[in-house]
Structures are given as structure tokens and as C-alpha cells.
């Protein structure tokens, strides 16, 4: 007698370095979201970093298309930059594109989104957590479905997945098989099983940062490369293969 099996749950790892791409692959991740500057929530990575990752790894890489930090209402020039970046990464071999564009009143910018989607097809398209800044997530989900978006990355219109878990479960039911609702932000090894049971999604987006001391021996303490909100200049963030493996074992 044929035994029905539950669909495989996929794990996407959010990261910002080539080394982390290799670690995610070693740990058994299904896919990565490749960004730069996760301190800003993730921006478009450099072409050089993507080419290097593609040279050394085979894991599918979805590339963030976000020209700056802050909100998701873009000027004409910023949107032109997004189109150009999307075209370049499509030609370079990206598995998919990740983006999010909103109107000033907090709705999905359907016109611009359609232009970008048409440009990158047949690549995968993910609408990122700009979704969580919409005025009505249930209507926004229907807009994304009509646009033909493959998946939406969301924390359930809350700051983190644990806070938005009830809404995420509702969004997963609303979506059905029309679009993938992928919970992300605040998922850890400690809460993964609980979130999976409560939400019931088929894909999860996980950020597993580790801090390492830099190789610098000389530490001038009075000079900073960033603004007033300062990161430690002498530590490096990355992803450990063991942390990815631990999450995959929970699926």
C-alpha cells in the first residue's frame, strides 16, 4: 500500500558573505537569500561577491534587490537601479530575485512590481518583509497572488515570527497553494519546532549569525567607519554550518 508522506519543509538561510554561503550549503540548507548589510535588513550584494559564491557553491541563491535601507517607497532613479540590478543578477545566474516595493499609503506597488517581475522571469520571485509594512496584509497577499509572486517573506505583520505566529497561520491558510508564505525573522533553533507546529508553513527563512573576532591586532578605539549607531569594528559576522545543520535536523 502506498504511504502518503508529508511535504518536505524547506529552509532558506539569510546571509551576507561568500563564506556563509558555503557554510549554509555544508549545513544542508535548501536555498540562501544573498544580501549585503544585514544591519540595514539586507541590501543588494555586490556582483563580485555573487560571482565568487557562484564559483565555489552550487546551492540555489536568491538575490536581494534593495538599493538602500529605510522604507520601501522608491524614487524613479532608485527603481531604475533596482531594474538594472535585477537584470544583471538574472544574467549572472541567480536562482531568484527578492524585492519589495510599496506605495506611499502602505499598499503593494503593483505597477512597479509587475515591471520587475516581468523582467526577471522565469526566475523565482520573492516579495520580502516590505509586506509587513502594508496597511492590510490579507489584501496585500491577494495582490501578490495576482502578480504571480512565488513566495512572500513575512513575520506576520509583527516585529518577529513568534509575535506574528497567529497571523502567519491565517496567511498560510489563506494562501493555500497559490503562493508560499515563508515565515522569517526571529526563528531560532530553540523555537523552530514550536513555530512550525503553530504556523504550518512549507518554507522557513532563518538568520543564524555568529560573531568572530577580526584578524586585526591594532585597534584604534577613537575611529569609526559608520554613523552614530555603531557596530563593533573588530568583529565579523557569519554563519556556521553546524547551526544550519541543527535547524535542518528539526524539520
Image: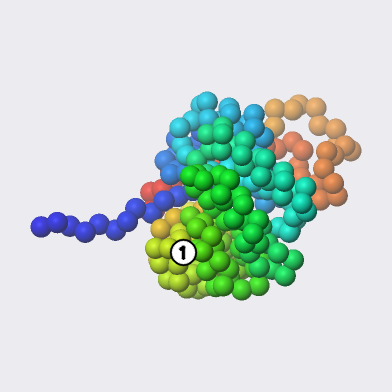
Report x, y in % for residue 68: 74, 48
Report x, y in % for residue 175: 45, 67
Circle 1: is it few (<14), some (14-19), or many (20+) Cα within 10 Å?
Answer: many
Quadrant of residue 28 within the rendered picture? top left
Can residue 200 be seen?
A: no
In front of the other: 174 or 170 = 174
Picture colour scheme: rainbow
Q: Does residue 116 sit above or below 49 in this rendering?
A: below
Query: Does residue 152 appear to the left or right of 43 in the view shown?
Result: left
Query: Residue at the location (29% across, 58% down)?
Result: 6
Report x, y in % for residue 16: 62, 40
Query: Residue at the location (51% across, 64% down)?
Result: 146
Residue pushed farthest right?
Answer: 222
In front of the other: 59 or 112 = 112
Query: Does residue 221 appear to the left or right of 204 in the view shown?
Result: right
In front of the other: 117 or 196 = 117
Figure label count = 1
Query: Does residue 38 appear to the left or right of 240 in the view shown?
Result: right
Query: Residue at the location (38% across, 49% down)?
Result: 249
Query: Residue at the location (10% across, 57% down)?
Result: 1
Mark 1, residue position: 195
Report x, y in % for residue 225: 83, 38
Can residue 62 be seen?
A: yes
**SS state under label 1:** helix
Query: Does residue 61 appear to the left or right of 40 in the view shown?
Result: left
Amino acid at each position: 500500500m502506498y504511504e502518503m508522506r508529508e511535504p518536505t519543509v524547506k529552509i532558506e538561510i539569510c546571509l551576507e558573505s561568500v563564506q556563509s554561503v558555503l557554510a549554509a550549503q555544508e549545513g544542508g540548507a535548501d536555498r540562501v537569500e544573498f544580501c549585503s548589510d544585514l544591519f540595514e535588513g539586507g541590501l543588494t550584494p555586490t556582483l563580485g561577491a555573487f560571482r565568487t559564491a557562484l564559483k565555489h557553491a552550487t546551492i540555489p541563491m536568491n538575490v536581494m534587490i534593495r538599493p538602500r535601507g529605510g522604507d520601501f517607497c522608491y524614487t524613479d532613479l532608485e527603481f531604475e537601479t533596482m531594474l538594472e540590478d535585477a537584470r544583471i543578477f538574472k544574467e549572472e545566474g541567480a536562482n531568484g530575485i527578492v524585492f519589495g516595493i510599496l506605495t506611499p499609503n502602505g499598499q503593494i506597488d503593483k505597477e512597479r512590481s509587475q515591471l520587475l517581475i516581468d523582467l526577471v522571469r522565469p526566475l523565482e520571485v520573492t516579495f520580502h518583509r516590505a509586506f509587513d509594512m502594508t496597511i492590510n496584509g490579507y489584501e496585500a497577499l491577494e495582490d501578490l497572488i495576482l502578480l504571480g509572486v512565488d513566495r512572500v517573506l513575512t513575520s506576520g505583520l509583527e516585529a518577529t515570527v513568534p509575535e506574528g505566529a497567529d497571523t502567519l497561520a491565517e496567511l498560510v491558510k489563506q494562501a493555500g497553494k497559490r503562493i508560499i508564505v515563508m515565515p522569517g525573522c526571529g526563528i531560532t533553533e530553540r523555537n523552530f519546532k514550536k513555530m512550525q507546529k503553530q504556523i504550518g508553513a512549507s518554507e522557513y527563512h532563518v538568520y543564524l549569525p555568529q560573531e568572530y573576532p577580526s584578524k586585526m591586532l591594532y585597534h584604534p578605539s577613537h575611529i569609526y567607519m559608520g554613523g552614530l549607531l555603531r557596530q563593533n569594528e573588530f568583529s565579523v559576522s557569519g554563519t556556521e554550518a553546524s547551526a544550519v545543520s541543527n535547524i535542518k535536523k528539526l524539520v
